[in-house]
Image: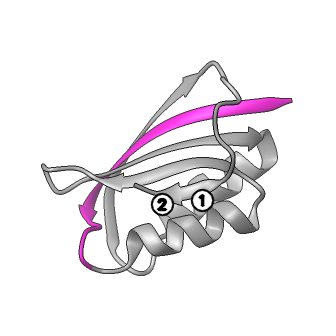
Amino acid sequence: MIKRVHIIVTGLVQGVGFRYSTVSWGKLLGLKGWVTNRIDGSVEIVAEGEQNSIEKLIEKIKSSSPGTVSKCIIEHEIPTGEFMGFEML
């Protein structure tokens, strides 16, 4: 079953390669969606895919290197199927 998550990650997550790693993890896990920096210093992620892959992405994000994650806010949403791949915005 396809799931969708909207994630806001705070901590030392900008300027350290966090988005690049997230894109790599997303592609490796077969997810679709995007990751982007936010003006407040956090990183925003939207991902769709199999539940197991979503859970693995969340684990990777929480134990992230590069960077230091201090908080990870996860909202579950209804999948839309709108994405073709996993990219950085």
> Callout 1, which amino acid?
Glu
Q: Residue at x 81, y 42 (%)?
A: 50
Where residue 84 sits in the image (x, y, percent)? 69, 46
- Tell me if residue 16 comes above or below residue 82 in the rendering: below
Q: Secondary structure at mark 1?
A: helix
Q: Residue most toward the right?
A: 1
Which amino acid is tagged 2?
Answer: Lys
Say what secondary structure mark 2 lies in.
Answer: helix
Q: Position of residue 38 (x, y in %)?
A: 23, 50
Residue at position x 86%, y 29% from top?
1
Q: Position of residue 59 (x, y in %)?
A: 60, 59
Q: Looking at the image, which residue sits at the far left?
A: 40
Q: Are marks 2 and 1 in contact (CB under 8 Å)?
A: yes
Q: Is residue 12 found left or right of 32 in the rendered image?
A: left
- The segment highlighted magenta reads 1-15
Say whether residue 70 is left or right of residue 60: left
Query: In front here: 39 or 12?
Result: 39
Tell me the chief SS of the magenta region: strand
Tag shown at residue 59: 1
Location of residue 63 with respect to 35 vertically, above or below:
below
Task: Tell me which corner region of the image, top left, top right, bottom left or bottom right, holds residue 36.
Answer: bottom left
Residue 85 bears which disc, if any?
none
The span from disc 2 to disc 1 (Cα, nearest Å) is: 5 Å
Residue tagged 2: 62
**Colouring of the image:** one colour
